[in-house]
Image (spheres, grey):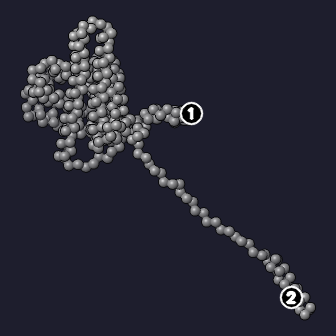
Amino acid sequence: MAKEKDKLLPRLRRKYPWLDHLVRANESFTENYGNHYAAAITYFSVLSVFPIFMVAFAIVGMVLGDNQTVIDQLTNGINSSVPAGLRGLVQQITNAALKSGSGIGVFGLLLALYSGIGWMANLRDALTAQWGQEKKAEPFAGRTLKDLLSLIGLGIALVVSFAITAAGSGVGSFLLELVGLADQAWAVFLLRVATILLSLLANALVFLWVIARLPREHVAMRSAVKGAIFAAIGFVVLQQVATVYLGSVTKSPSAALFGPVIGLLVFANLVSRFLLLVTAWTATARENQKRVIRPPAPVLLEPRVTVQRGLGLGAAAGAFSAGALLGWFGRRKG
């Protein structure tokens, strides 16, 4: 039975290319220390979530001023990107960041920069490893500056993503009210579908930036598009799974005290593993596989020795006797 099971997976991999791709991605994830990198990303994610939010909302407050409507749309977009079990905690973090954002101070800015750059450095190293790229030695100042620019770029991508999601819902509802279709079930359904598609598009743009631009060595954008689409769809599924899981976890007595923190750790770890797995899946696609030219088979040189046999002892004696007789008869005739 064990032998039959061992033969089943290779047979299925030959039959279904998508299964072979998943298996190769999982093997690459394991070989490139995906679990260890996911743990490091989780630690820095939890450590840096509040300082980064504090700086981000301080910048949003300076740019938008007192435009509470736009700020509410951004916070709603952030809440919709996390499972239902974490929305209360995320709401508390965003509210605290909004209140303290104007008085962030030098210490808060330095703390945010330290934790944010540490988080980005680990994320970039993890993505680089999944692409099979070597980590090159760089000057500390240059590497830190690149990580800071990557952190800012990812922040801009996230803001654009939240804005697209929030604007799709808000603008759609406004248009339905404007044309008098807000009470029509089919119009509300179409708006819901359009909002989901916009949310998927926004997530795909963020994942495209992460997969293609965050590794130390940039990869082809074309290769990352399929991975970004796959990640955007998978992230929605991951949200639903995390919602069910966190709902079951928070029912335990110990979760009453540690539930939100445990939930944040679990969700951050799930997202980290998922992101690295998607990157490994993208990197192991056929178009990204390096063609290895195998050397020719070794040539076995075998010397061939041909033995040519001469006359034997008896044959030589017979020939000598025949020659002697012929010579004797010749002399008699002479």
Q: Secondary structure at mark 2?
A: helix
Q: Residues within 10 Å of mark 2 (few under 14, many from 20)?
A: few
Q: Residue furthest bottom?
A: 334
Position in image of residue 245 (x %, y %): 34, 20
First of labels 1, 2 by sequence position: 1
Residue at figure coordinates x 35%, y 37% from the top left: 223
Where in the figure is residue 309, as x and y percent of width and height?
74, 72
Residue 174 picture location, percent across and down: 21, 13
Residue furthest out toward the right: 333
Q: Residue at x 19, y 22 (%)?
A: 74
Residue 47 in the image: above or below residue 333: above
In the figure, is residue 296 to the left or right of 232?
A: right
In this picture, residue 332 sits left or right of residue 198: right
Q: Residue at x 35, y 43 (%)?
A: 132
Residue 290 appears in the figure: yes
Q: Nearer the viewer, residue 2 or 299?
A: 299
Q: Quadrant of residue 181?
A: top left
Please name which of the two marks, 1 or 2, marks the residue nearer to the observer: 2
Residue 75, quarter of picture: top left
Q: Are marks 1 and 2 in contact (CB under 8 Å)?
A: no
Residue 201 in percent (x, y) is at 30, 26
Q: Nearer the viewer, residue 324 or 88?
A: 324
Q: Which amino acid type corresponds to the residue marked 1 in the rendered image?
A: Glu
Residue 227 versus residue 35: which sits nearer the camera? 227
Q: Which residue is mark 1?
A: 4
For the point 31% across and 24% down, the residue is: 200
Secondary structure type for disc 1:
helix
The quadrant of the picture occupied by the C terminus is bottom right
Q: Quadrant of the N terminus?
A: top right
Residue denoted by label 2: 327
